[in-house]
Image: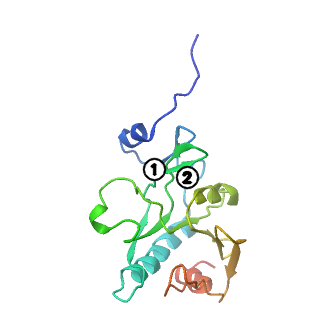
Amino acid sequence: MISTEKLSLTPEQLLALPEEDATCELVDGQAVPKHEPMSPKRFHARLQPILWRILEDWCSAAECPKPGSAHTGWAIVLTRQGEPWIPVPDITYISNERLPIEAMADEPCSAIPELVVEILSPDQSFGAALQKAAGIPRVWIVDPQAKSITVFYPDAPPKTFTGSQAIQEDFLPGLKVVPQDVFAQARIP
């Protein structure tokens, strides 16, 4: 008889797998391709570098009160419901305070970042994207179809920003993101 039981991977085993075309996340002990069953589409591909550039310009500016770095596709080592979990957000911002430059190595992020950004693809559910939120102080869910950015807070209800409503708060001092400007720059009709 052939066994169909799936073997559970540890974080170390996931990270030791050979690199493939698909980025995998560790979810419930399984290597799950990040964009399964969908693949990023044009809107996703246009928005990711624009949002990354906005965050990177802000956090690397000499006058930034919370310097750090922004990353695309960087795995984060977390625990969710007592189990190891390694999500790969579309964009991550982490301050030098949480992860000093000298502590950065060519490996998954070992500290909880201040912000992760997930850009919804047409076949992706809002709930699936929100699962990235485990223990992360700010999560932005970008919806290209609605031209909105919903910000999730650990201690308050989420707030959806559209049009000229600026995302601006003390937690990320000096950062100002205006959804209509982001979507216009991405040339999303």
Left or right: residue 68 versus residue 103 is: right
Residue neighbourhood size for the residue with mark 2, other residues' Cα within 10 Å, grouped as few (<14), some (14–19), many (≥20): some
Residue type beneath disc 1: Thr
Q: How is the image coloured?
A: rainbow
Residue at 68% of width from left, 82% of height from top?
A: 162
- At x 46%, y 37%, the residue is 10
Residue nearest the viewer, comparing 92 with 154: 154
Q: Are marks 2 and 1 in contact (CB under 8 Å)?
A: yes
Counting residues from the start of the chain, the first of labels 2 and 1 encountered is 1
Number of marks present in the image shown: 2
Which residue appears farthest toward the right when viewing the image?
Answer: 157
Query: Which quarter of the picture shows residue 97?
Result: bottom left
**Quadrant location, the C terminus:** bottom right
Q: Percent position (x, y) of residue 2?
A: 57, 14
Give the residue pinned by disc 1: 23
Mark 2 element type: loop
The amino acid sitting under disc 2 is: His
Establish if 130 lies above or below 9.
Answer: below
Q: Nearer the viewer, residue 95 or 142?
A: 95
Residue denoted by label 2: 35
What percent of the width, then of the height, locates residue 147?
Answer: 66, 76
The residues bearing labels 2 and 1 have C-alpha atoms spaced at a distance of: 8 Å
| Residue 93 lies in quadrant | bottom left
Where does residue 1 sit, x and y in percent of width and height? Answer: 58, 10
For residue 126, the mark is: none
Mark 1 is surrounded, within 10 Å at the Cα level, by few (under 14), some (14 to 19) or many (20 or more) other residues, namely some
Residue at 46% x, 51% y is: 77
Please determine whether, in this image, residue 165 is positioned above or below residue 110: below
